[in-house]
Structures are given as C-alpha cells and as structure tokens.
Image: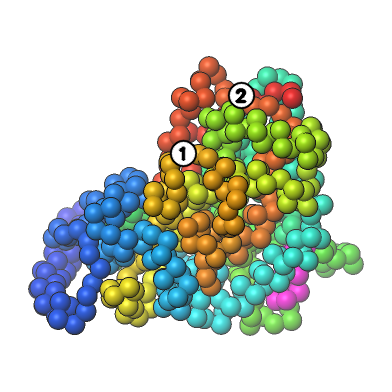
Amino acid sequence: MDYYYYATPLALLLAWTLVQGFNLILSLRTNRRRRKLPPGPLPLPVIGNLHLLGNQPHRSLAKLADFHGPIMRLKLGQTTAVVISSSDMAKQVLQKQVSAFSSRSIPDLVQVDNFHLFSVAWLPASWPQWRNLRKILNSRIFSVNNLDASQHLRFKKIQELVVHCQRSSEMGEAVDIGAAIFRTMLNLLSNTLFSKDLADPYENSGKEFMEMVEGIMLELGKPNLVDYFPVLKIIDPLGLRRYNSLFGKLLKLFHGLINERLELRKSQNVQKTDVLEALITASEHDPQEIDRMHIATICLDLFVAGTDTSSNVMEWAMAELLKAPEIMKKAQAELSEVIGEGKAIEEDDVVRLPYLQCIIKETYRLHPPAPFLVPREAGQDVEVCGYTVPKGSKLMVNAWVIGRDSTLWEDSLVFNPDRFKDSKLDVRGQDFELIPFGAGRRICPGLPLAIRMVPVMLGTLLNTFNWKIEGDIAPKDLDMQEKFGLTLARLHPLRAVPLPL
C-alpha cells in the first residue's frame, strides 16, 4: 500500500525530470538566439536553485544579487523566479511595467477550495471582480471621510492599550509588545467591521486568533515543494494543505458573524452603521458584484493583513528604540514639548511630530513588513532593462535589501531616524527607495489606515511610559533575530516593562 502511494508521484517526477532535461537543452539554445535572460546562478538538475534559498531567503538572495546584479533569474524546481534588488529596477517593474506584473504568483496553499478566486489579495488585477472589491475597500473602509469618521474608535482602542500597559506598570510586569498591539488592531478592525471586540482589551486574550494569523503568514512565506513541483500536488509532501484549516477556521468565524448580523436585522428594526452593514446592503442591491463569500473573504484579508503587519512594525520600532535609548529620549523630548508629557495624542498631532515620523520611516526601511512584498507573476514575456522576463515567472521584489542598499543609504545597517530629517522620501509608493507597502496598482489598500494608526500608537507608548527591557539585558545585547514568513516577524517576542515617566 505504501509502495504504491509513493511510487506513482516519484515516477511522475522522474518522467518530468527527463522530459524537462531534454526541453531545457533545446530551450537554452533557442533562448540564447532569441532573447537575453537575466543572469543568475547555475541551476542543479531537478531542484534548480532551491538549495540556495535557506531559511532566510531575503538575506540569501541579497548575497546572490551582490554577485549577479539587481535583476536576477533563478530556477526553483519547475518555476522561474526573477528577483529585483534595486530601487531603479523596482520602479521599472512596479510602475513602468505595471500592467505586465499586476497579477499575483498564487501559492498552492490559497488555491484549495478556490480561496484565491474570492480574495482581493490574490485575484488578478485585470479581472472586473478585483476592481469591484478594491473599489469597495477604498470607498467604504479606507476613504478619507470614513477614516475621519472612525477616528474616535481608534482613539478609544489606543486608550485601552494604555490601560493595559498601566496595569502591567503597577504590577512591575513586562508587556508582550507584539501581542498587545495585535490585540489593539484586532479590536479596532472588529469594531470597524462588526461593532464589537473579538478580544478582551485588558487581558492576554486573542491568542488563538493571533496564532492562526501568524501560522498563515509563516506558511505563505516558506518554500513549499508543491509550488515548485506541481506534479507533487497529489501527495502534498510537506503536508502544508493542512494549513488550509487556518483559512477555514477564520472564514467560519466571519460567516458566523455575518449570520449573527442577518438574524439581528430580522429581529430588530435598528440598523448598525458599520462596514459589515454596508457590505450586506451592497450584496442585497447587487449580489453579482459581492456575495456572502466575498464579504467573509474581505474580512479575512483585512484581519490577516491589518493585524500582523502593524504589530510587527510596532514591535520592531520599540525594539530599535530600546536598543538605542538616546533615540527614545529624543522622541520623548519632542512629544513632551509638542503634546505635553503624558497627554493623549490624536491623529492630527502627528504632522507636528517630525522626529516621530522619522522613526517610523526608519523602521519601515530596516524592517519592511513583507520583505518580498507579495510576489507577482509576469503575464507575458516582458523586457526589463534589456533583459527578457519570461511569461509565468514569479517576480520577487526584495524590499528588505533595497532598504539596506549602501549606495542609497549612508551607514545603511544603522538605525538612524535623523537620515530622514530633511528628506521628502515617503512610504506611499512614489519613492522606490522606501516601498514597505509596495507600489503601483497593487499597493497595499490598508496604507491609509496604517499611516494614521502606527505613529499614534508608538507616540502614545513613548509619551505615557518609560520602557525597560525585561530582565537584566543591556540595550546593546537585545536579540534582533528574524523569523521569515510572508511578513518578517521577530524570532523572539519583545517583552518590555512600562515604567512611570
């Protein structure tokens, strides 16, 4: 029984290898005559360059780019990947060739049950359905008017974060910074969408939700053999399809909240004014444009992207400040002078806090939430700076290495917010030296919320407390190791003790 289970896929892989080897010889001869492919390391038989990725692909590919250049081709099993490692090349593919690279490279993990056909994160940008869903996000959630109207809600959630930290301060206990910010963002989004908290704002709840989101991000970022050898899909050698249950659990949660609202509408005449109500109303008016599955998937996209990225950025920002106490003191001095020590910060105050803004930009430079953004796919053969990117290639823009490019940044590995003091560089996708949210048509739709929320959260923590690393760890010895996934998290959670100012 076991023999037949493994013999068939192995035989298929062997047959594919022989055929591909013969085709490779022919294609190399043809390609050399017809087109100039990007340079790259010599691939091994069958696996290609998979052995070069390691467990920190953003770092491994940065080293390879030092030798092969800012546009580099790799063979990853059956897949051709093109890696972009400079701001100039990023501008070419994300702005000047935007239509050719507007589709996503779809991992096998999100193809189960056709999840990718409902998600705005994975749908091709050329599809009307993607444009409709993106329009809904922009008009009903992330528009200036809607964000202004929900500002009081964000203020309330940040004050709940302060209360949580105050309780820890009184007990002399450390705060898990990432978990606390995750819980704040979780409740902010759940109140915006559903008018209710999904976690207790004052307790260490929401852990299961956080673990599911982290699990999704980690698995989406890890190499999956099925993505590189589709012939192996029938056996799923790493068992990664089991992680589809994480998508399933979250979708079940959101379907339950939708059902709860529909029942509430039947039993009560009072209507909510939140996003879910707007989406249900839109679905009733035009079910072809948006249905129940679209609504649940929009919720999943928002919660997965909105909670994990913001908590990671905040955790990295606090880690860098704890590692450099003089920078933290400088930020606190600005807050004290402009806002008043211990006073609450509002979103309109951020424009008067230039050094705080510099800290946020410097954090995004060194610690972009998604080191490769979200990989794209070439919809056709595309010429980029004299090289041909073959149709179907997976396009990976290494935003992590661009942020550390020594030709762009002086002392590029040093956390120095002052480098942005007289700079007009911004994170909104126009300056390709700094693209933590991506750029072009597929720029992160949640950018307007993030640029409001992150500075206020960080400023509030700094203006309300002094902070000390848990234990007897000296600032210079703080562990800064990374855990690679679709997003770049800290290997070890940051724990810090809030102290009275």
Q: Which mark is residue 32?
A: none
Q: Write down the residue under mark 1.
A: 414
Q: Residue at x 58, y 53 (%)?
A: 423
In this view, the residue in front, 280 or 303, is: 303
Answer left or right for 380 relative to 172: left
Residue 464 picture quarter: top right
In this view, the residue in front, 145 or 252, is: 145
**Residue 28 magenta-highlighted:** no
Q: Is residue 62 above or below residue 296?
A: above
Q: Is residue 90 above or below residue 166?
A: below
- The amino acid sitting under disc 2 is Lys
Relative image position of residue 278 (x, y in whole percent): 76, 70
Q: Residue at x 32, y 73 (%)?
A: 385
Query: Which segment did they paint magenta?
Result: 274-283
Relative image position of residue 364 (x, y in whole percent): 53, 49
SS type, badge 1: loop
Q: Write down the residue under mark 2.
A: 468
Which of marks 2 and 1 precedes in the sequence? 1
Q: Is residue 497 above or below residue 80?
A: above
